[in-house]
Image: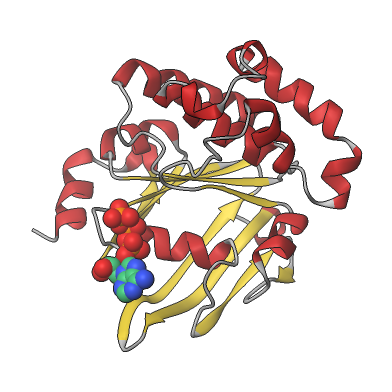
């Protein structure tokens, strides 16, 4: 990796909840247009790290650099405007609003709002079911469709980097497969992807580079194709 094509750089980040240190000296890099994965079990610190990148939590120390700019501690809406979008764990869609309304809410930055028709068409091309159901109330969608809606909403801010937090949770394997195919399509179109997963096999298969977390630290890193599932599991569980 040369530094020239690094889109996101996390440098020595520490995060606390009160006295409890949830993230300990975490550093990693994301090359432009790549798919990287962050793997770890419950409580490893994955969501905490993502929240710091997305501006929902402020690190105690360390730096987060996006496209060469220090974005550490910026507000979440400013970070979306810089080009980072998060698909949160549990989807967090607005259940009583229509599919269309949920999507339009995603393009709230001035840049995205100006091109929201184009963005909406792209989302509908990627997920035709959202077009079909655009006037339906979001809570009427199936779990898989709701996940597609959460991804669509994130794409409506026209991100250069999109972060997926445990998108396979609670979904049937066939749906998960379909969603992963869509992620790879999103990446082929030029968007950099950070995947956060508990599923070791799927993460290794879907990404070019992996970081394994345990107890708030990165305990193993490597090219996904070169990492053995067993070694990842040992690092993951700390056996
Ligand atoms: P999960 O898959 O369960 O989301 P995770 O890897 O994303 O796990 P985090 O949610 O980041 O893990 O949690 C990391 C650690 O921080 C855990 O020990 C958790 O109990 C703790 N933690 C998370 N949120 C808070 C909070 N708001 N206050 C205090 N401790 C927290």
Residue nearer the viewer, 163 or 90: 90
Vertically, is 177 above or below 189? Answer: above
Q: Position of residue 72 (x, y in %)?
A: 63, 75
Q: Position of residue 112 (x, y in %)?
A: 83, 43
How many numbered tags mark residues here? 0
Residue at the far left: name it: 239
Vertically, is 165 above or below 79? Answer: above
Is 190 placed left or right of 93 in the picture? right
Is 27 placed left or right of 68 in the picture? left
Residue at the far front: name it: 96
Q: Residue at x 66, y 61 (%)?
A: 3
Q: Residue at x 41, y 37 (%)?
A: 167
Q: Is residue 60 visible?
A: yes
Q: Residue at x 63, y 41 (%)?
A: 154
Residue at the far right: name it: 114
- Colour scheme in use: secondary structure
Residue nearer the viewer, 162 or 9: 162
Residue nearer the viewer, 89 or 228: 89
Is 176 placed left or right of 51 in the picture? left
Question: Which quarter of the figure is the C terminus placed in?
Answer: bottom left
View quadrant of ligand 1: bottom left
Q: Position of residue 22 (x, y in %)?
A: 33, 74
Q: Position of residue 57 (x, y in %)?
A: 52, 72
Vertically, is 93 above or below 135? Answer: below
Question: Which quarter of the figure is the N terminus placed in?
Answer: bottom right
| Quadrant housing residue 220 | bottom left
Q: Residue at x 67, y 19 (%)?
A: 135
| Quadrant housing residue 26 | bottom left
């Amino acid at each position: 990796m040369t530094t020239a094509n690094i889109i996101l750089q996390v440098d020595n980040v520490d995060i606390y909840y009160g006295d409890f240190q949830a993230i300990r000296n975490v550093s990693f890099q994301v090359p432009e247009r790549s798919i990287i994965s962050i793997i770890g079990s419950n409580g490893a610190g994955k969501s905490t790290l993502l929240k710091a990148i997305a501006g929902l939590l402020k690190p105690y120390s360390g730096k987060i650099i996006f496209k060469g700019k220090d974005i550490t501690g910026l507000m979440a809406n400013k970070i979306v405007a810089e080009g980072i979008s998060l698909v949160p764990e549990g989807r967090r869609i607005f259940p009583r609003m229509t599919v269309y309304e949920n999507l339009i809410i995603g393009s709230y930055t001035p840049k995205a709002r100006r091109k929201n028709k184009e963005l909406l068409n792209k989302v509908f091309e990627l997920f035709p079911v959202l077009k079909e159901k655009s006037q339906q109330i979001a809570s009427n969608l199936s779990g898989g469709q709701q996940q597609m809606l959460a991804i669509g909403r994130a794409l409506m801010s026209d991100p250069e980097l999109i972060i997926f937090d445990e998108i396979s949770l609670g979904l049937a394997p066939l749906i998960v497969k379909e969603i992963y195919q869509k992620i790879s399509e999103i990446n082929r179109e030029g968007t950099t992807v950070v995947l956060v997963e508990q599923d070791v096999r799927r993460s290794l298969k879907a990404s070019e580079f992996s970081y394994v977390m345990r107890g708030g630290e990165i305990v193993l890193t490597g090219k996904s194709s070169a990492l053995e599932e067993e070694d990842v599991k040992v690092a993951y569980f700390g056996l």
